[in-house]
Amino acid sequence: MWTRFRSSGALRSLATWDAAIIAATVLFLLIAAQSVEHFGTARNAGHLVIDLAPVLLLALVMTLIVMTGEIDLSVASTVGLTSAAMGVMWNAGVSLETIMPLAVLLGAVLGAVNGLFITGFGLPSLAVTIGTLALYRGLSYVLLGDTAVADWPRNFTGWTLGTIGESGIPNLLIPMAILAAAFAVLLHATTWGRSIYAAGANPIAAAYSGVAVRRLKFWLYVGSGAMAGLVGVLWTLRYSSARADNAYGLELTVVAVVLLGGVSIFGGKGALPGVLAAVVLLTAVQNALRLAHVSTEALTVVTGSLLIVAVLAPNLISSAGEALRARRRRTA
Amino acid sequence: MAVESDPPPPQPHPVIALTGVAKSFGAVRALVDAGLELHSGEAHALVGENGAGKSTLIKILAGLYRPDAGHIEMDGEAVAFTGAADALAAGIAVIYQEPALFGDLTVAENLFVGRQPRGRLGRIDRAEMRRRAAALFERLGVALDPDRPAKGLSIADQQLVEIAKAISLQARVLVMDEPTAALSGREVERLFGAVDALRRKGTAILFISHRLEEVHALCQRVTVMRDGRRVSTDPIEAVTTDELVRRMVGRDLSAMYPHRETEPGDVVLRVEGLSRTGLCRDIDFTVRAGEIVALAGLVGAGRTETVQAVFGIEARDAGRVSIDGRELRSGDPRAAMRAGVALVPEDRRQQGLLLDLSILRNATLTRRHRLSRLGFLTGGAERREAAEWTGRLHAKYGRLTDPVGTLSGGNQQKVVLAKWLATGPKLLIVDEPTRGIDIGTKAEVHRLLSDLAADGVAVLMVSSELPEVLGMADRVLVMREGRLVGELARPAATEEAFMRLASGQEHIGEVRS
Amino acid sequence: MTTVADAPDQTPSAGTGSTALDLILRFRALGLLLALAALIVITASVNPRFLGAQSIRDLLFAAAVTVLLAAGMTVVVLTRGIDLSVGSTLGLSAYLTATALSSGTPVPLALLVGIGAGAACGAVNGAIVHFGKVPPLVATLGTLYVFRGIVYFTAGGSRVNASDLPRGFLDFGSGAVLGVPYLFIISALVLAAVAVFLSDYRAGRDLYALGSNPEAARQTGLPAGRRLMTAYVLCGALAGLGGVLYAARFGTVDASAGYGMELNIVAAVVVGGVAIFGGSGTVLGAGLGALLLTVISNALPVLRIDQFWQQAIVGALILAAIALDRLVGLRAARALRRKASHVD
């Protein structure tokens, strides 16, 4: 669908993109720790980890989806809808132990709806998920209106913000690290990962080689929904608030980090380490700006610009390289 | 029309002349020292193996690429094209192998896009546009409705639209890149008729084709290219087909079709009553171990559609497909693969390969489950497997990690064959196995298929090249309009017998294949 | 596809083909009109005041901006693009126009400021898409946030109040002739102009060609870059004009003007039968789609449906519209296959 924008030069330069983004992240962390007050403290590092959890978790599945050449713009709305549904269930007196798996299940169902429209009816994922972005967000408003459910049990909300004993390591860090590692192995060292790359590079040829492309994509959307459900639980407990507008606009950040991490919007190219670095980079930039008292609205400029630059930069680099080579040939 | 039969007197300058043209893409030198002169009223053939640089040369003529070195002259004056619009304005029209029309626009608008006749206030005069389009089609003698959308036109009709467009542009140079690849004999004749009429009116024609008999039928002069250089330019009578082939390949060619003596074994594939709505119907046949069976017919006869249903990449609407007596589930290529079926598809770039991914990933894609342990893959086994099979097929490449899209057509086809041979198939289906690959590789592929059959593999081949079908197959199954209309065993399989069945006509005069 | 070795020449099966296509297209406009009529009849039967002069005027006021932006969006979507930044562009233009007016700039100049700001935003989008080769979705998703951020930067927490704006400007914004607001008349005229541009001018037809087959457009030597820029600049300029109308209608403008509007516009265009991947659709259909969405949102309170349902309905409509398009396309393809085949 994006063939008009495909350029082999851009794809070639992505091989080094991973390394560049990791280097940029490290560099930024070092500079910010020096120049931004409170940035380098252990306390702030803990906050940073908690802050980046939702984006990281959503980006793990989004990476796989973008890798197959598709997109899911409805993730943030799915987070919102599961959060709203949690609020309704809590108000109805359902126990939190029951609510949490149900929320993940609801997310999976919402993802399956996307998957059905995209793989079952063969509709473009962009259009479908713009539709469900509006639909799911709308339904969360239908459920909760503009009210909030805030009386969540302390022991749960506390855990999301807490640390392991006195170590200062956030409780969330370990499960996040395990999940990230699991997705990296899944993508880079399993037959399933090979299928994902193949389906993204050329879905027709992949199907001819025995990859069940549609089934693969369907389950990725189910996974994306389930992960959004999990993030819905996390978000609700972390902010101790179920609201219809939870995670509003977060899809932009998620897509931005995936592209910034070097995954090609055309599919078939990219790697998870770059995405993980991009998550850290973007969250750290936002965190540093906030510490430097830059307004929240201005942060959207940063996210938006990073998104554009992430896709623009490799294209510009490669076309500049091409022009240089052409000139060298002509003078030679 | 006697006036038209005489070509105009020779001009002092060629209409267009290219000298010393060079063009590189990264490290690949597509053109080193190419040259070409086209004269008014003359059809000029450009032949060469794939990778010889023909397509690059065409794109330079079309203004899509800019040469790194060399000169282009029109009527003796130097010109430089900075885009397709420049070349068009200079009177150069190019018809590509797959015509690129605007499906959502009408046929008439396709003819005049960007230069529609205008009326008051600069608005498009649709009546005038329709009238002009109809006049063009009348001149070409084709009955196409100018008002229908271009979507859904056959490739032959699309090419006629392109020719009508070239006429309306009053093109001085018409470049045609393998226009006959997808046409039936009748359609080729109609196309040649239209082209010849243009030539007689003074247009210079550049005709690119792999079918050398067509070159002899249509052209007056022929240029051979090899490795980005011009090898020779001669009047067509001065060179034989064999000589052309020798110059294209750069060496003498031993027999294209290896001789085989095999005793077919047990039935491997049995197809009964196979049907796909609107595509093929009631197909029955078998293929035995050690046998090469060709599924032949004109383009559009339903051959590819049939093998797609056998492999399961498309579901069948009725009928049975069984391997070694066990029925295959409809629409499930994975089941077919498990049963030992391999399909080398028709369109290498779209269906066969992941062009942006490495040779390694491509060559091992079909084997990923067997190379893994509990679903986990280690790089070593994949590398060994890929190196082994690409080596056996003599594929030429730099590193296994290079994108497969950087290889030449012939080497790409070897990677496709490698990935399927690695699965150790019982039944190998090859759809147009030698389309668009050079003659040297072609002979290699033929030998390979022959060796596989000798080893007891059942081979089912679809091919539009009649010499290949007749030279390779033990039996030829002929399809027409979605049905199996006959079977020719080796001694009885002749060109005439095939054409009679394939076109459904009792009396065939001289029909080109 | 066709196997006519024995048929003398292709018989022009074409006539039927184009009428079938016409029917589908007309069916879409017809279907929209029917849906509109049904919705209006049902709502009016619940509350006859829905058809009152005041209610209709409110409706047309609300529709004016949506119709305008839908026309601009159509132009971009035809080229296989999308412009998600229209809401932010409108916000920027509305704020700049209102600020200019409140500081005493004459109305015609302020109008130019608004449209110019929109066109500049469009030019940025076009440049990123064309020169930067960034997919339109990504580019405009980014500028959606960048443009909005710029409004927040310039506006801060401040806003322009109606009392700061010239009387004449506000009167025009709330004025009507024969019950039809001036604003809606402007939108309708612009829509008609865009419709004529798209159907009767070479540049307009080039946009269809670009969306239909970009590779062929390149080979034909169509000025793809210039046309793409035209499309994005036009879309931006119309969003800019939308911002001026927004300021005229509401008088009070803050940094959040037009927030989240892009979804409604995309919905209007898709519901109006413009193919999301380019090449087909009309600006008239998009206008009808915009009208339908506006009627729905105005009918909700009358039908005593919670206003919170609105966004959900927009989402459901997008899904329904693309699913319907797909269905129609599949049926047409199947019909073509049956007709072209020689197997009965």
Image (cartoon, grey):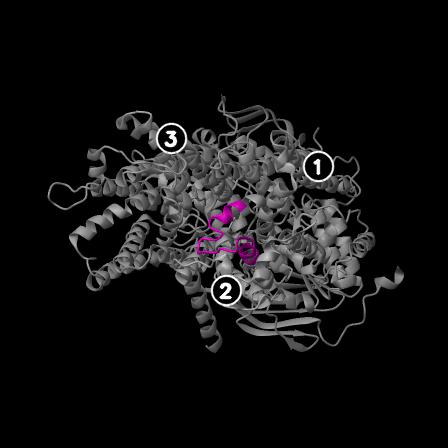
Disc ID at residue C340: 1
Q: Position of residue A160 (x, y in %)?
A: 22, 39
Q: Which chain is disc 2 placed on?
A: C
Q: Which chain is disc 3 placed on?
A: A
* Amino acid type, residue under disc 1 in the picture: Ala
Q: Residue at x 71, y 72 (%)?
A: B14
* Quarter residue A284 falls in: bottom left
Tag 1–tag 3 contact (CB < 8 Å): no
Q: Which chain is disc 1 placed on?
A: C
Q: Is residue B454 left or right of residue B120?
A: left
Which element is circle 3 on?
A: helix
Q: Nearer the viewer, residue B181 or B103?
A: B103
Residue stretch in magenta? C243-264
Q: Position of residue C312 (x, y in %)?
A: 48, 37
Camera-near label (2 vs 3) is: 2
Residue annotated with mark 2:
C102
* Amino acid type, residue under disc 2 in the picture: Ser
* Quarter residue B287 falls in: top right
Position above or below: A117 against C211: above
Q: Nearer the viewer, residue C6 or A258?
A: A258
